[in-house]
Image: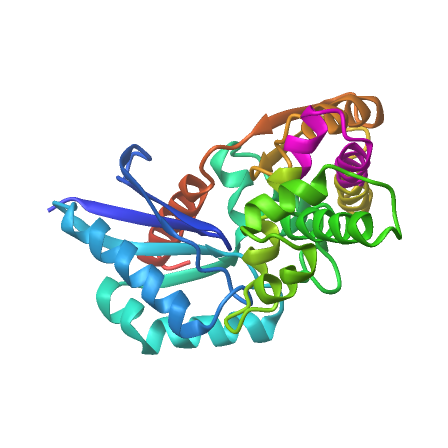
Amino acid sequence: MENFFLGLDIGGTKTKAVVINSKSGIIYESEGKGAGYHAMPLAKIEKNLVVLIKSIKRNMRGKIVFSCFGFAGADSQEDRIEISSFIKKGKIGKLLGCPVYLHNDVEIILPSVTEKNKGIAVIGGTGCNFYGMNKNKEAYASGLNCFISDEGSGFDIGLKVLRAAVRSFDGRGQKTILESLVKEKANIKNIRDLVDVVYAKDFEKTTIAWFAPLAEKAADKGDKIAKQILISAAGEYILGIKAVANKVGLKDKEFVIAFVGSTVNSKYIFPNIKDKIKKLFPKAILKKVENPAFGAAKLAMNYYIKNREGF
């Protein structure tokens, strides 16, 4: 029976899965619901992941011997201890029946596009995160959840969209078509009814990020407020990249900057980042990563090899 390695990229909105063989060949890919830590209760995280893993195992004709999870929201040591414990003791660990290695989701990106131990990973989805590495140096920026960081993320943009819509309605700010777009999206007749949508009983930060795409929709119609929101978001990504690059000493080197997420790859955000980053780091190679779960699967295989060889 062939040995397989499972990688999961677990975000707030969706979870991507990749299974590879011992030659790093992708034999199976799948997608499930979001399960980001801090984005929802642990019970819901477990439920969503169990559904996905059961589906994966039904399609396997070999054995998954090692797994690696890239978890959005696994930022502190305390976070990782809690997540590891609930995986090991709960339904997920029993279902997989193999070692599970845990990483923050930003740490699985570079292995999916480069074998070198240097580069920068950028996540811009529901949340936002930056990770830089250069040999034995590593650095992080942002990624500490929506209330104290994550500027430029889907949550951040969605929140600014909602605030702009309310300010427009109140007369406290400039008129913007975001007001009508938000009402349509939320299926409400009066902006003040947003309170029941945003502060629902089972509040999740994905509720706010749900409104982020309206910024691009309004910008396409020439809305100045929406364009300002998106330009501001691009600026936050540039700041994050500069911060980790400077900390690990990548300024004058050739290195990869890998981008993941629908928010950072927006047609109003990514080109703005690209133009400015190429001036700041002329040797940088910018890559859009479609599925970082492949990087997690490669890490799982590396852990298996090290374990087998006694490292």
Residue that appears at 27% across and 39% down: 22
Question: Relative to 21, does residue 199 appear above or below in the rendering?
Answer: below
The quadrant in which the C terminus is found is bottom left
Which residue is painted at 29% across and 54% down in the image? 52
Main SS of the magenta part reads helix
Taking 264 as reference, is 66 left or right?
left
Residue 230 locus on image (x, y percent): 75, 36
* Residue 221 quadrant: top right
Q: Could one spot residue 251 in this view of the protein? A: yes
Q: Is residue 136 above or below residue 119?
A: below
In magenta segment, residue 229: yes
Q: Is residue 124 left or right of residue 246?
A: left
Residue 268 visible in image:
no
> How far from the left and from the top, in percent, is residue 307?
35, 58
In the rendered image, residue 16, in percent from the top left (x then y), is placed at: 39, 45
Whole-percent x, y for residue 24 in the image: 33, 35
* Residue 172 belongs to the span the image colors magenta: no
261 or 95, which lies in front? 261
Q: Quadrant of residue 76?
A: bottom right
Quadrant in the rendering for residue 29: top left
What residue is at 30 percent from the left and 48 percent from the top? 5
Please name the residue shown 68% across and 55% down the image. 191
- The segment highlighted magenta reads 215-235
Residue nearest the observer in this picture, 237 or 243: 237
Q: How is the image coloured?
A: rainbow
Total residue callouts: 0
71 or 67: nearer the viewer: 71
